[in-house]
Amino acid sequence: MAIAQKKSAGASSKKSLLKYLQGHWQLYLMILPPIIMLLIFAYGPMYGILIAFKDYKVSQGIWGSAWAKNHGFYNFIKFFKNYNFWECIRNTLTLSLYSLLVSTPCSIILALCLNYARNVKYRKTVQMITYCPYFISTVVFVGIIKLVLDTRIGVIGSFLYDTFGLNIMGSASAFPSLYVWSGVWQGAGYGAIIYMATLAGVDMQLHEAAIIDGATLLQRIRYIDLPEVIPTAVIMLILNMGSILNVGSEKVLAMQNQNNLSASEVINTYAYKVSLVSSFPDFSYSTAIGLFQSLVGLILVLGANKVADKVSGNGFV
């Protein structure tokens, strides 16, 4: 009797599901293209992860290539023992953490300033000016930086070189700050969009009540706006933790030279050089480096989410 009831319940649920799909097939048809793209470009290439555990030969293919030594972990061990390993890790963490600590507060401050700007034309003008650098390509953006900081013809670079003997583009100690603050100039306006959207959803009755009680502007920001912005900032921090070892190789590579190599050699640029630029490309080695980055990023995302959920309750479910 119980088995018959379970079978009838299962059949009825299948019928209801089929009826639901027939009634909403347009919605599923709309999400079909992005699902197909996700399968092709995100999940399909995961088959190539096998290269990290093999002594990959292009002529033999992925399955035809022999497994690497040390039970397939030879390429990982080779990377961990490489003399560049700790330098790449240090430079990558320095740039990533520096960017995280600077970019988010700058975007929040810009969003707060724009939110309290009374002149509508002025606010829209500032928004447009701060958004524009984000849409400049990385190569053009770095080209602008090099022209400005050139020791011969650059407006700032020639002044610093003639006055103090400083070559900013050739200084390893100045590279992290140059990388991060140029990124703030390029992305702070675009990053402020999500925080402005959050501030737009703040109940105005709270501000009206605070004004009646005699609260100053800074007090309203501290006790009303920031508590609303912090959950969004925490979510963005969790999402960004996954890419903490994935510093943008395009910008770093474009800004890199022999003088600042000790501070600009990150994991991505090193993997690029050993796989594509080297006279003897080692695809298995570079794939192992990329897989190591992904695994560390996954661990950091899960850990940051757990900590954020425990401390403030703002993590993902």
Image (spheres, rainbow, N blue to C red):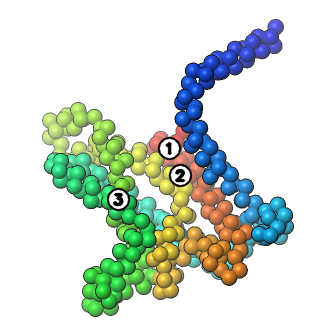
Q: Is residue 240 above or below residue 151?
A: above
Give neighbour class at mark 3: few <14, some 14-19, many 20+ (Cα, 10 Å).
many
Depth check, mark 3 against mark 1: the one in front is 3
Q: Is residue 259 above or below residue 10?
A: below
Q: Indicate left or right for 214 with 228 as reference.
A: left
- Residue at the image position 48 percent from the left and 73 percent from the top: 252
The residue tagged 1 is 315
The residue tagged 3 is 188
The residue tagged 2 is 304
Does residue 218 appear anywhere in the picture? no
Does residue 84 appear anywhere in the picture? yes
Give neighbour class at mark 1: few <14, some 14-19, many 20+ (Cα, 10 Å).
some
Q: Indicate left or right for 200 with 122 as reference.
A: right
276 or 308: which is nearer to us?
Answer: 276
User: Residue 270: x and y, percent?
Assistant: 60, 75
Depth check, mark 2 against mark 3: the one in front is 3
- Residue at the image position 41 percent from the left and 49 percent from the top: 233
Q: Secondary structure at mark 2?
A: helix
Report the amino acid beneath label 1.
Gly
User: Residue 228: x and y, percent?
Assistant: 34, 42
